Amino acid sequence: MVRAQENTPEALLQSLKDSGFYSTQGPHIYEMEVTDSELNVCCSAVSTVIIQAHGSATAVTHGSSMTKASLSLGRCQQSPWIRLTIINATGKRAWSNPVWR
């Protein structure tokens, strides 16, 4: 999925250059905000939200039909990058590009 202001070749190309895209098998990431201590996400209904970071650092939350989640970066806080993965009830995933901090 590419996030662009309009459906023109110029806007789509600029969004790709600005990393305004993510990969998906079905779930949607509507909004993702990274602060110094947490990650906030708005998405389609999912059962798992995962933060992945450099090495084996991760943070996970599970629920039923979650459309919003806030996860503490915890062990991921020292990583130079983090990546969001969401998984819906049927096992379909969506994942962000690395967010460099």
Image (spheres, rainbow, N blue to C red):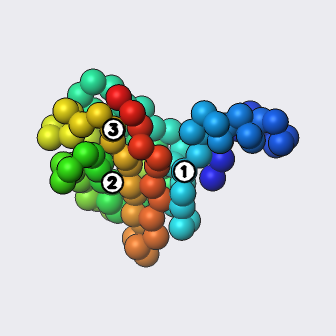
**Percent coordinates x, y for residue 64 in the rendering:** 33, 61
CB within 8 Å, label 2 to label 3 = no
Tell me which amino acid carries mark 1: Tyr
Tell me which amino acid carries mark 2: Val
Left/right of residue 42 with respect to residue 18 in the rendered view: left
Q: Residue furthest right?
A: 8
Q: Which marked residue is nearer to the observer: mark 1 or mark 2?
A: 1
Residue 72 showing in the rendered view: no
Q: Earlier in the sequence, mark 1 or mark 2?
A: 1
Residue 49: numbered disc: 2
Tell me which amino acid carries mark 3: Trp
Q: CA distance from mark 2 to mark 3?
A: 17 Å
Within 10 Å of disc 1 (Cα), the crowding (few <14, some 14-19, many 20+) is: some
SS at mark 2 in the image:
strand
**Percent coordinates x, y for residue 72 in the rendering:** 21, 37
Q: Earlier in the sequence, mark 2 or mark 3?
A: 2
**Percent coordinates x, y for residue 100 in the rendering:** 39, 33
Count of numbered circles in the view: 3
SS at mark 3 in the image:
strand
Residue at the spot of label 1: 22
Within 10 Å of disc 2 (Cα), the crowding (few <14, some 14-19, many 20+) is: many
Q: CA distance from mark 3 to mark 1?
A: 15 Å
Dividing the picture into quadrants, the one containing residue 8 is top right
In the image, what residue occupies the spot 21% across and 40% down?
76
Left/right of residue 46 with respect to residue 39 in the rendered view: right
Within 10 Å of disc 3 (Cα), the crowding (few <14, some 14-19, many 20+) is: some
Residue at the spot of label 3: 81
CB within 8 Å, label 1 to label 2 = no
**Percent coordinates x, y for residue 65 in the rendering:** 39, 60
SS at mark 1 in the image:
strand
In the image, what residue occupies the spot 35% across and 29% down?
101
